[in-house]
Image (cartoon, rainbow, N blue to C red):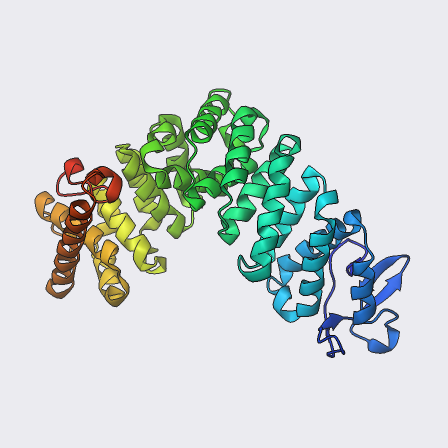
Amino acid sequence: MLPTNRTGKLVGTAPFPEHGHGMAGIIFMRTSGVGRLTSQRKDARLTAIGLLDEIKQANHVDIVLYWKQLGRLAACRPLWMRAYPGLSLIMREETYRVLGALGAQQLGSVAHVMAKSHVPNQGAWMALWTELAHAATALVHDLNPQALANMAWAYATVGHAAPALLEAVAGEAARRVAEFKPHDLAAIIWAYAKLGHVVPALFEGVAAELVCRTVAGRLYEFSSQALVKMIWAYGAAKHLAPLLLQFEPLALEVAERAHTFDPQDVADMVRAYAIAGHVAPALFEALAHRMAGSVRELNPQALANIAWGYALANVRAESLFGDGAFAECCELVAGKFGTSELHQLHQWDLWCSEQEVTWRTLSPMLLERCRDATWMLFLRTRTMQSSRPSVSPRGSSDMDCSRQRKGCNRM
């Protein structure tokens, strides 16, 4: 077992010198049958090679326990794989060896810890992710709600597309959505949006479940972070966004909790609600008050999303834009805006002109770049449409000229 103290937490680690097998290891000391780490080599009774040999002889249950303890290590040392490449190599090989013996929940646990440990989705590790997906797909009906969420979250986190697994997990989750805890509901819907694998039945089921729990007075069970993930996910799903984001009680809850959200999360929610077409001035004003004074914490993408979102929602938000700090922050990071972000800022500037605002807006230099970016996106869209005439503009580009509103295209 990996080293723990009496509370079950992993204790400090120390690299072991390279051995003949070219593996870096960890010094362990046996105490009551449980491996305990020590930085004092004179007390070590189990060398690095001894540990790795022990892992090679472990059964599937022990391998899962090793992974779980590595998950604890990942919490305080996320890049442990780089520090201990020998241990990483052996864990990969031995997980392969016992894969066929792992049960459904064990597969979910292993996938979750692998993702937390930043196991890469490349090379030999990619092959393991693929085999793990095959094994989990065969046992998907045995996965409990938490394991279903963990499995989807893990594959989304590492960016591994596993269509068969995702379809199977989505079908099972949609059927049992009432059994999910709030955290798991948020995790699974976030995962599918992150991968761009939108399954309507799942998104419809999760939205309906949240509505049911709200009606039952249980919306308080969802943490602010869970709400952020769900709102972001439905915004990313675009055409499915209204399923959840047109629900007024949720908007009221978000407005009430506005002060608890991180500024970057607020930017994501503004974009999501704008995509959903939910015109709720009270919500947008509450989010604006949260961001006032915090705009310097926003990255370029967040700044662009906020500008575009408020323009599309047609909410002036004097508390956010009125003092000119927002435009000033845009100027400070002007060189970091991408084409799409410049296009969003251009739409905001058009809206500001239409509203005849008196606050500071974009400088002539930045505005010219925004116009150039908008023209570039227009030409790119036209080129894509002409080269694929069988594909409608709505399906080929985020720029949908037929859905203009006050100079703002839905992105």
The picture places residue 392, in percent across and down from the top left corner, at: 21, 37
403 displayed left or right of 233: left
The picture places residue 261, in percent across and down from the top left corner, at: 43, 46
Question: Is 156 or 363 nearer to us in this picture?
Answer: 156
Residue at (63% x, 63% y) in the render: 77
Q: Is residue 316 visible?
A: no
Q: Indicate whether 47 appears above or below 2.
A: below
174 displayed left or right of 290: right
Residue at (24% x, 58% y) in the render: 325
The picture places residue 185, in percent across and down from the top left corner, at: 52, 34
Report how many numbered discs are placed on residues in the image: 0
Image quarter of the C terminus: top left
Q: Indicate whether 249 appears above or below 400.
A: above
Snapshot quadrant of residue 73: bottom right
Q: Is residue 148 visible?
A: yes
405 displayed left or right of 238: left
Question: Is 290 or 93 nearer to us in this picture?
Answer: 93
Residue at (34% x, 59% y) in the render: 299
Image quarter of the N terminus: bottom right
Question: Is 408 or 150 nearer to us in this picture?
Answer: 150
The picture places residue 22, in percent across and down from the top left corner, at: 71, 76
Q: Indicate whether 282 appears above or below 114.
A: above
Question: Is 218 or 180 nearer to us in this picture?
Answer: 180
Residue at (26% x, 33% y) in the render: 277
